[in-house]
Amino acid sequence: MSTLRPVLAIDPGLTESGVVLWNGAAVLSTGVVPNERVLVMLSECSHPVACEMIASYGMAVGKTVFETCVWIGRFAQTAYDTNLNWNFIFRQEVKLHLCHSTRAKDTNVRQALIDRFGDVGTKKDPGPLFGVKSHAWAALALAVTFHDKVYATSTFSK
């Protein structure tokens, strides 16, 4: 079993980002929050941070991708300014780690997390992933990948 060490993971977006605080066994906090709030969270954080990094796969991209890149840079600068352990993770690495295929889609990644940790559950009977919604699924996938690779095997490439 993994060591219980919290990691903050961010799935960056144009105006808001998915965030998850994961300790290797449980979701401690989750949500989709405005990017300005993510900057505050980073300035107050003391845990390692894993952030999805955008990669080019040869296809044309639009304005929103570049604007998201600006937010990634702002998040990274805030993390560096506060001496956080900052880590970029590419989506392909997450897919390969959780689904064993870079062709996996978001639904496959979500299902892999549910298969591994259990059903989401309901408000009346919450499961271990209760509260994870929308872009927070991608953030949880980042957190699990980072946690597994850093704390379980120590072979993570930055």
Image: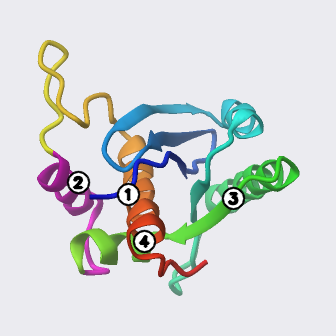
* Residue receiving disc 3: 85
N-terminal of the pair, mark 4 or mark 3, is: 3
Quadrant in which the N terminus is drawn: bottom left
For label 2, the residue is 113
Q: Are marks 4 and 3 in contact (CB under 8 Å)?
A: no
Mark-to-mark CA distance, 4 and 3: 15 Å
Up the image or down, 32 lies above or below 88; here it is above
Can you tell which quarter of the image residue 100 is in?
Answer: bottom left
Q: CA distance from mark 3 to mark 2?
A: 24 Å
Which numbered disc, 1 or 4, marks the residue that appears first in the sequence? 1
Q: Where 129 falls versus 5 (above or below)?
A: above
Q: Position of residue 77 (x, y in %)?
A: 83, 54
Q: CA distance from mark 1 to mark 4?
A: 8 Å
Circle 2: element type: helix
Question: What residue would you read off at disc 1?
Answer: 144
Give the amino acid at mark 1. Val
Q: Are marks 1 and 4 in contact (CB under 8 Å)?
A: no
Which quadrant of the structure image shows residue 157? bottom right
